[in-house]
Amino acid sequence: MSRTVMIVDDSLFMRKILRGILAEQGYTVTAEAASGLEAMKNLHANHPDIIFLDIILPDSNGLDLLAEITTVCPDSKVVVCSSIGQPLVIQKNA
Amino acid sequence: MDMSPYRDLFVSESRLHIAAFGELILRFEDSPGESAVIDELFRHAHSLKGMAATMGFEQIVAIAHGMEDLLSKVRSKEAMLLPDLADLLLEGSDTLARLASGVEAGTDTGEDTTELVERLALSASLSASLSASSSASSSASSSAAATGTQTQYPGTALNTGANIPPEPSVSSSHQFRQADSFKSIRIKTETLDHLVNITGELITNRYRLTEAVRLTDAAESQEALHQLSTLLRNLRDEVFKARMLPFAFIAERFPRLVRDLARKQGKEIVFQLSGKEIELDRGILEDIAEPIVHILRNAVDHGMESPDERVLAGKPRSGTITLTVRRDKDHVEISIDDGGRGMDPERLKRQGVEKGLISREQSAEMTPQEAYQLICLPGFSTAETVTDISGRGVGMDAVRETVQSLAGVLTIQSQRGHGSRFVMRLPITVSIIPALIVQSGPIEIAFPLNTVSRTVELESSAITCESGRPTAIPGETSLPIRSLRQALNLPAAPNSETALQPVIVCDIGQMLAFSVDRIVSQQEIFIRPLRSPLSHLRGVSGATLTGDGRVLFVADAGALA
């Protein structure tokens, strides 16, 4: 059975790019979310296998969302994506 | 991976971030400590950086990163809020806008941005040192900046870890906001224009079909035709809805414009904008932006007094320019109040006479209301009104022309010592509008209904035509009535036998009246712009196709008067 993939990013541009990269690798993105709210809705409804998660979202902090994901879908694999360079955020959540 | 398919999307999304960024900086300047604003600024810079990095646009990455870093430190209070911080951030966002345009055009702007990036980095480190040791004077810091000395600034939070900056989004609980990006898609504006054109043609075609069915008396077609009309109305409404954009779409640059101009002139101005959520057709928005810029510029340049002058006049040093957008049924009113010195009608009249635009007699009879309209005459504004913002000379005559070409009306009110008020009343959609079709001699011409205030019938003998002398019109003040035949250079009517002659009264900021031969009908028309050489025709602002396939011109009442 093919895996379900969700992309969480507020940027349409980033979602498209990521979708393109994943398609090249043979993965089909089954859901996209542009906000924490949309992500949570999809999470509860579909329990995606793989989640690409941007940590800066307009309505929520992706890291808080990560905690929520691990509770709701403990089996989901989460890839955190960000271009954030501020070391403390990275350390704190390492 | 070939990134070229993503370039358009990159440009359009970047623009959204840059525009939002510019607006936020001004809010940031108003209330520098507001963490929600800094968070938003940070988020936009960050998103832009990520996108640019993905595309491999190093210059954009470096600037966006510099801004993001600076903001991150301001947010964590490692960096102090320096007064010129907003200027630096604005410079950054302007540079980003230019680079994004370069990406769009597929050209390298050739701009050297290393110096800007250095200043962003320096600003972040300098302000950090200032806040860390309050004794450090700004002159010492700037001398360090000037010589580029590598100084180790002690006590920054990153080193001590004592002051942990909050995370990118400060809310620790899930405070979700509605995001509706999946409920909308982006469409090329050309596509929307095509949709309007096709809809317009369909409506015209419907009139022809109705006519044809009426002639053949095909009763069974009636029901289908009726349904077609209803569907077409729905289609028209939906197409228009798709073209609507909030006023905010063009308003982003206005606060910045007023701020920069005021600074340059040493004036203290608060800019207030209300109603930016009100929606208008994007074509109207596009056309009206430049006139608004011009009026705002005039308000700062000429309307608003200098702080000293204001104090002398017993006013607060700082003045307020207000831009208000208001919906009124199927119209939108955009008004700009400057609360400044106001205009002197006598002075305007004198200038009008001096420039040979009006005669001394005309000036004597002018009401203040009419005198204000003088500034809209071609040749009244002088070189001083050529804007250096747009780089083009746009006078008030061009402003009035644009408003009228949109089937709108410009009114000017002023009170000496209390300021001037420019009001642009515009239809919320263009292209398909109700019009009154009138006939003069062999010519039928359409007057947009929003410019017609009423129609009356007067006894021909009561009309003192051609003399320019006013005729009493029931329910109106006396107005000079112009014969439309004469306005259109048609031969005068053969001695009119008809006792009653229709007169249409137009209100386009000034009241005008035209006598016509016949009022033909009222119908919806789809206005098409005239192209060269027809665009030079005086007195007409466009053309439309009637149900029976004839071309009608659309009257420009102001130019016909």
Image (cartoon, rainbow, N blue to C red):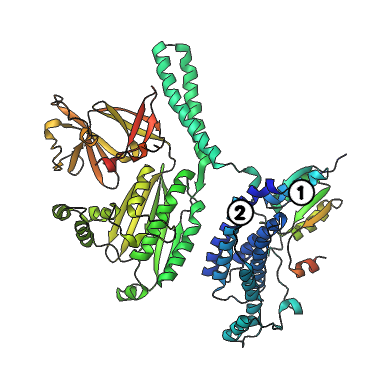
Q: Secondary structure at mark 1?
A: loop
Mark 2: give few (<14), some (14-19) or many (20+) Cα within 10 Å: few
Q: Counting residues from the N terminus, which is met first, the one under dot 2 or under dot 1?
A: 1
Tell me which corner region of the image, top left, top right, bottom left or bottom right, holds residue A59: bottom right
- Residue B369: x percent and y percent? 24, 54
- The front one of B271 and B555 is B555
- Examine the rendering and report whether any part of residue A43 can be seen: no
Left or right, B393 with respect to B371, comes to right
- Residue B197: x percent and y percent? 48, 33
- Residue B163: x percent and y percent? 72, 76
- The front one of A66 and B372 is B372
Residue tagged 1: B1
Q: Nearer the viewer, mark 2 or mark 1?
A: 2
Give the amino acid type for the residue marked by disc 2 in the picture: Thr
- Mark 1 belongs to which subunit? B
Q: Which mark is residue B107?
A: 2
Tell me which corner region of the image, top left, top right, bottom left or bottom right, holds residue B561: top left
Tell me which corner region of the image, top left, top right, bottom left or bottom right, holds residue B474: top left
Q: Secondary structure at mark 2?
A: loop
